[in-house]
């Protein structure tokens, strides 16, 4: 499947806390477009923001991903108020000037500019690539 076909297949898909949240989408994008596997998320973490931040920061798989200063195509993007306590995930796509593919409850799957996401939620963005 081409990137364009994949994006057409997911754009606008509604957010579902249990079946298709931001981690599900990030995992699907990483597997489909970049041949990378992310750990399976425990569905119970979705509702508890503090626990989700703790698990994202301390999960053993995090050691396999290195923070980078500037995003590259396919970088995993973790977003949150504090670096190291992120609660939202997406994927950096370089095409179209650099956008983050993510999903949230009010919008479903969307491609958004990083500055817009950072400002709208007062998030800090952390870009990671596999070591």
Image (spheres, helix red, strand yellow):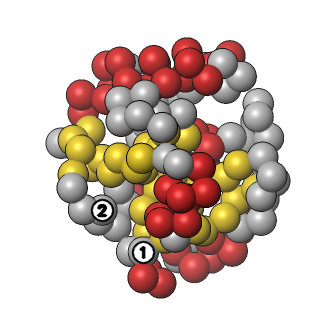
Q: Earlier in the sequence, mark 2 or mark 1?
A: 2
Residue pointed to by mark 1: 98
Q: Is residue 6 visible?
A: no
Tell me where residue 95 appears, x and y as whole percent: 43, 80
* SS class, disc 1: loop
Tell me where residue 84 appears, x and y as whole percent: 35, 30
Left or right relative to 88: residue 91: left
Looking at the image, which is closer to me, 30 or 113?
113
In the rendered structure, find residue 118 and report the number of the disc placed on it: none
In this rendering, is residue 78 above or below 5?
above
Instruction: Identify which residue is drawn at 21% across, 41% down.
Output: 66
Looking at the image, which is closer to me, 8 or 129?
129
Q: Quadrant of residue 49?
A: top right
In this rendering, is residue 105 above or below 115?
above
Residue pointed to by mark 2: 71
Q: 10 Å neighbourhood of mark 2: few (<14), some, or many (≥20)?
A: many
Left or right relative to 7: residue 36: left
Instruction: Identify which residue is drawn at 37% across, 24% down.
Output: 57
Which quarter of the rendered picture does the C terminus lie within? top left
Q: 10 Å neighbourhood of mark 1: few (<14), some, or many (≥20)?
A: some
Tell me where residue 21 appears, x and y as whole percent: 68, 41
Tell me where residue 115 appears, x and y as whole percent: 47, 66
Looking at the image, which is closer to me, 47 or 39?
47
Q: Quadrant of residue 56?
A: top left
**Mark-to-mark CA distance, 2 and 1:** 9 Å
Instruction: Identify which residue is drawn at 70% across, 49% down.
Output: 104
Badge 2 vs badge 1, beta-carbon distance below 8 Å = yes
Q: Is residue 45 visible?
A: yes
């Amino acid at each position: 499947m081409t990137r364009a076909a994949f994006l057409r297949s997911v754009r606008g898909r509604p957010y579902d806390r249990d079946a298709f949240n931001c981690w599900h989408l990030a995992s699907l994008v990483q597997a489909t477009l970049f041949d990378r596997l992310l750990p399976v998320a425990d569905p119970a973490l979705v509702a508890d923001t503090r626990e989700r931040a703790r698990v994202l920061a301390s999960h053993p798989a995090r050691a396999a991903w290195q923070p980078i200063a500037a995003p590259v195509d396919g970088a995993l993007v973790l977003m949150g108020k504090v670096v190291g306590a992120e609660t939202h995930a997406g994927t950096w796509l370089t095409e179209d000037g650099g956008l983050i593919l993510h999903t949230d409850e009010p919008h479903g799957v969307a491609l958004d500019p990083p500055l817009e996401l950072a400002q709208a939620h007062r998030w800090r963005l952390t870009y990671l690539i596999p070591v």
